[in-house]
Amino acid sequence: MKFKIVTLLVMSSLYANVLQAHNNKDLTEQSIVESIRSHYEFSKPLNKFSISYEELKPIAFQSYHYKKPDLIKSTYLFDFDIEKKQFYVNEQSYYPGGFIFDNVYFSEKLHTLYYDINGFEQGKQVLKFDAQMNDFKESMIGVADFLVVDKLLEEVSTKKIKVTFKKNNQAIIQVPQKDNMFVRYIFNTHPIELKSVYFSKKNATFTYNDFVKSNGITYASKVDYLVKNVLNKQFIINNVKPINKIEKSKLLLPSGYGPIINEEDKPLEFIKIAKDLYLINHVSGDRHVLVKENHDGLMVFGAPISDKTSNKVISFINKNIPEKTIKSVYITHAHSDHMRGLTAYAKKNITILADEYSIEAIKAYPKFKGEIAQFKFQTIVNKQLINGVRFYIPKNSHSKGQSFAYFEQSEIIYEGDFLEVPFDNTVATHMSQVEKEFFEFVRKEKLKIKRIVGHHRNNNITLSHMNRYYLANTPKTKSNL
Ligand SMILES: [Zn+2]
């Protein structure tokens, strides 16, 4: 789970390339450009403004059931002060199982600081990174038609544009980009209104609908984003308004937050955490993989994010335990970020351990289509014991078939998205539904727990922390006192 604003930043590269200047436009081209310029005049002085919108994205392989994709919702509030190069962003994302990520990014001198409001993901730690106001502005530019047009108006003075007029009062303006790529804008001409913008580089289109006017600003309130003509995201713009400045409190860390740490890639670590059980740290950032050593070979727990990551993990395991080969790899559930590295294992003839639903989802996952014939599976069922590892598949609201592994001898659990505990053991002010389900399940089963290794973030969650977390977020009744 979790894509964050960083994925949005990728979209900014759509605009990146510039060709040589050219001033050979004919009058017709000029007149349409002038009409657009005068219609969007309001946006020119708009260098301090606030915009809030919702983003809805159907993501099959982040849903409870891949055949019934959930609309993953995120809400954004952006404040920009272009003059002072300051910004504030609040991003809230909702994932199946009741997970709410509630993050703030803001400019702090030459850096960006990033903190977590409910303490659910990062606790009180604050991340510092190099992205600047313009990176954030570019990341959301397609969402606002007037920002897209600003970009066009900037480019028409330096590039050779091609304008085609259509009979249905539409004008198509094509702006060349590097490597034979182009951006194509379609406008209604009576009245002037941007209908869509197409980026050939990504084969992606924004379409603009339901224009509203408020605070002297005209904007499309419904925006669709299509990739290869398939709806990828929908945006509902709730408000755009000019502001005088960004509130001071938004540009400060709330009290109690710290330390500030730099985002950096750390090398993999191989740590023995019990007899025949090893933890691999820093897999693709803050993920964890476990390795269990059996007499006849190795079992791997977790295959996150990509084949590149898996190949790195596999070489690392081979280097650390050269005398044994990997026999199987287990995934907790069939969400893309937890299983995308499976092909690397399948190509090495390593058996995939997963429950029945997850295997069905793996077989349906488009990215595996080419190599699926090479995938070898072993289906696990609830409470099955394999080499001292008990697999549990509790009913849960995050993903159908989500399971966890319980190492009976060492009393250690490895889980995927049943529990989100930040590194610093902050007791978060939000607990998701699925975490409550998990907590109640392990209590009902009376599992002895020395340590929980989270796939994400904290790899040493204690039972006492879980108790504190649960009690802090559960109304007090007789049964849990
Ligand atoms: Zn998940």
Image: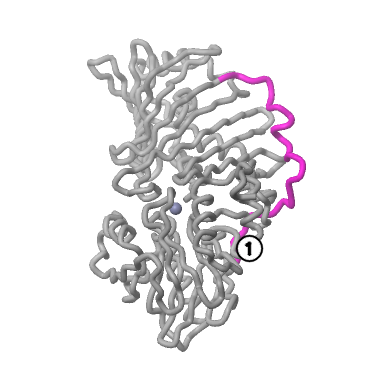
Horizontal and vertical percent for residue 408? 51, 74
Q: Is mark 1 within 8 Å of ligand 1?
A: no
Residue 30 part of the magenta-drawn span: no
* Residue in the image at 28% along x and 14% along y: 169
Residue 256 part of the magenta-drawn span: yes
* Tally of numbered discs: 1
Up-down relation of residue 325 to residue 458 (above or below): below
Q: Which residue is nearer to you in this view: 149 or 433?
A: 433
- Secondary structure state at the residue bearing disc 1: loop
Please identify the dominant SS of the magenta region. loop
User: Which residues make up the magenta segment?
Assistant: 241-266
Drawn side of residue 376 relative to residue 408, left or right: left
Q: Amino acid at mark 1?
A: Thr
Drawn side of residue 46 relative to residue 346, left or right: right
Up-down relation of residue 25 to residue 471 (above or below): above
Horizontal and vertical percent for residue 99? 51, 45
Horizontal and vertical percent for residue 279? 55, 72
Callout 1: few (<14), some (14-19), or many (20+) C-alpha neighbours within 10 Å? Answer: some
* Residue in the image at 55% along x and 76% along y: 278
Circle 1 residue? 462
Q: Quadrant of residue 280?
A: bottom right
